[in-house]
Image (cartoon, grey):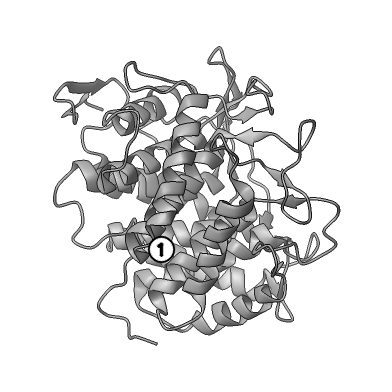
Amino acid sequence: MPLRASTRPDGRQAASRAAPASVSTWLKECFLPAWIERAMAGGRPGYIETVPADADQEATDARSTMVTARLVYAFSLGHRIAPDSGSRRAAEHGLRFLLDRCQVAGEFRHGVLAGGDVSSATADLYDLAFVLLALGGYTSATGDCTHLATAEDLGFYLDTLRDTSQSGYREPGPTGPLRQQFPNMHLFEAFQLLARLSPEGPWLARAETLVDLVETRLIAEDGSIAEWYRPDWCRLEGGPGSEREIGHQFEWAWLLYRHAETSGNMRAADLADRLYRFGCEAASIDGKAPFGLLRNGLDAAGRSLDERRPLWPLTELLRVAIAAEALGRPGPAATVADDALEAIFTHFVDAPTGLWVNERDSSGAALVPSSPTRLLYHLLPAFAAYAQAREPGFVDDNPILDRPNAAWPSR
């Protein structure tokens, strides 16, 4: 694999021993084909959920609605990036399993086995958000509107779970004493996508209620979003439940920038600026020096909760940096996206194989050497965003924003 050398926005040459020379070529010719084969290994129903670090170790038959839906979305995006890669076939393979096995008597389940036996309870809010994202992603990529009716039915069901006075969504089952913000974050992502597919429908209004939730309940004075909230979406003060995750700071910010760009709601961009700034400050990213492993979990005082340094926050940093750059929003520096890409390939992703180490500790030692396939949801869009921003002619349409293809009809 050759050295990657490209011109950064600051005019310097970026060179990495690990990154491919062309991210878009690598996506089309290496990454996508390798992961289609791994995820569908043996032709069994659904997708393999973890590729073991030990090649001799057998993959399990455990399946879940969340991972299945994530990969349907990822491979649908893969089809837009490389129509001849087999990604559509891979997306349809998972979509059949999602609708025929993960759904029982009209209700989605949290976990199933490859043979179809239900292994755990009813789907939670996090699962359902990704079901919507899978249905919307497949529709956007293929022009096949067959499954939008299922998404619409699920949307009306979710309306019954909305805390109307506070704008957030609660879990479908017993909710307990607290609310989690990140399932609402992924609902926001799905609502945005579906609003572009059905602009006359209720999806945009649903998305706007979650912008309201961020502005009025979730975001703190310092620009942070916590992981847990009270049932009225008030913040918890100190102790367990007040922790923050840097990766979610970046992910929320990216989604809000995207919403601002597609809807014209610049209030969302202002909120994104605050979230992005907090995340960069918490991760000590100032654009003046390269960075590598990012801490993620923080307590209320900003201290690291543990030594884990996961891969996924770097992918979200890459996406939000590209989005902020495209919108001309303030950020640490124009080099952050390039630095994030270098860190991903230097510390986590092996370009020749496309495999990755999921987590390291602060010293760089691998904690989780296996490659969970759920991370394709983070990796593929991040790499595609980078390629589109840095490699002219990568694609004619915009896979990152999931803009519609001209082929599919208006509804």
- Residue ID at (81%, 65%): 173
Amino acid type for the residue under numbered disc 1: Ser
- Above or below, 214 against 396 in this view is above
Secondary structure under the numbered disc 1 in the rendered image: helix
Q: Which one is in front, 42 or 404?
A: 404
Residue at image x 53%, y 57%? 70
Q: From the viewer's perspective, is 98 left or right of 394?
A: right
Of residues 165 and 105, the one drawn nearer to the viewer in this rendering: 165
Near-viewer residue (307 or 184)? 184
* Residue 347 x %, y %: 44, 23
Query: Residue at left 49%, top 59%?
Result: 189
Q: Would you identify the image quadrant in which residue 336 lies? A: top left
Count up the numbered dots: 1
Categorize mark 1 by other alpha carbons within 10 Å: few (<14), some (14-19), many (20+).
many
Residue at the image position 43 percent from the left and 67 percent from the top: 193
Looking at the figure, which quarter contains the C terminus?
bottom left
Locate residue 108 relative to residue 388 in the image: left or right: right
**Residue 263: image location, x then y, percent:** 37, 66
Q: Which residue is mark 1?
A: 76
Quadrant (top left/top right/bottom left/bottom right) for the N terminus: top left
